[in-house]
Image (cartoon, rainbow, N blue to C red):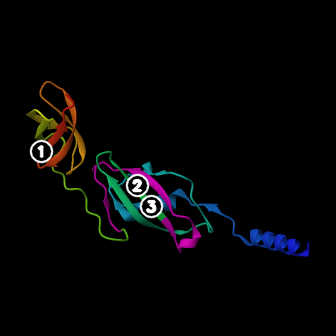
Amino acid sequence: MKAMGVVLLMAVMVAGARAERVPIPRSLIEAAVARAVAGVNVAAIEVLAQPVADRADPRLTVELVRVDASRRWIEARLRCEPKPVCVPFYVTAEMGPARTAVPLMVSGPPVRPPQWLVRAGSNATLVVANDRTRLTMPVKCRENGARGQRVRVEAPGGVSYEAEVTGPGQLRAESTR
């Protein structure tokens, strides 16, 4: 019985010694993202879950940035310095009016912006193929796209397709018929 009382007393002491967790202010999150990524609309940052820290003004570092140019948004992973102050958390944001976001300082290898092989408004060649037939047609791209990305295109007559970028001015779509 005495051992149980000691364990209970230790648990109460540890719980009482733990620092109060406080929400991380949005202004600190916006400043950290603005320092790390150029071309982001910081007013449109969405915090996926309210992060908390052991202190009121933690120093934030952006440790990972993913840029999705086709949907015009970025995802960033932030953490506190030193690490035990808070748990890493994610935010998303829209790209600014320039439609491109470029990470400026991210730990790890440098991240390069995508190399567009087709651009919105440009003409390209769409190849639609299946096992028996192959059709080539001119199309107008509705979105920028890098190799392997899927973009919207419009064929003569106003028919829209989604196609994969295969090379400069070249797209591919599969026929189901």
What residue lies at 47% left-to-right and 57% top-to-bottom?
90
Looking at the image, residue 153 lies above or below residue 104: above
Looking at the image, residue 47 lies above or below residue 20: above
Q: Nearer the viewer, residue 141 or 59?
A: 141
Instruction: List the residue tagged with mark 3.
Output: 77
Q: Quadrant of the N terminus?
A: bottom right
What residue lies at 40% left-to-right and 63% top-to-bottom?
64
Instruction: List the residue tagged with mark 2.
Output: 75
What residue lies at 12% left-to-right and 28% top-to-bottom?
156
Query: Which secondary structure lies at badge 1?
Result: strand
Q: Nearer the viewer, residue 78 or 151?
A: 151
Give the amino acid type for the residue marked by disc 3 in the picture: Arg
Circles 1 and 2: CB atoms closer than 8 Å:
no
Query: How many numbered discs, if any?
Result: 3
**Residue 149, how many percent across, how many down?**
24, 47
**Residue 82, how many percent across, how many down?**
53, 75
Query: Which secondary structure lies at badge 2?
Result: strand
- Residue 170 is tagged as 1
Left or right of 95 in this view: 128: left
Highlighted magenta segment, given as a residue range? 79-105
Circles 2 and 3: CB atoms closer than 8 Å:
yes
Q: Residues within 10 Å of mark 3 (few under 14, many from 20)?
A: some
Task: Report the Cα–Cα distance between label 2 and label 3.
Answer: 7 Å
Task: Report the Cα–Cα distance between label 1 and label 3.
Answer: 34 Å
**Residue 89, how many percent across, how many down?**
51, 59
Give the amino acid type for the residue marked by disc 2 in the picture: Glu
Outermost residue on the top side: it is: 157
- The reply to whether the magenta stretch includes residue 4 is no
Left or right of 125 in this view: 70: right
Q: Nearer the viewer, residue 142 or 1?
A: 1
Q: Residues within 10 Å of mark 2 (few under 14, many from 20)?
A: some
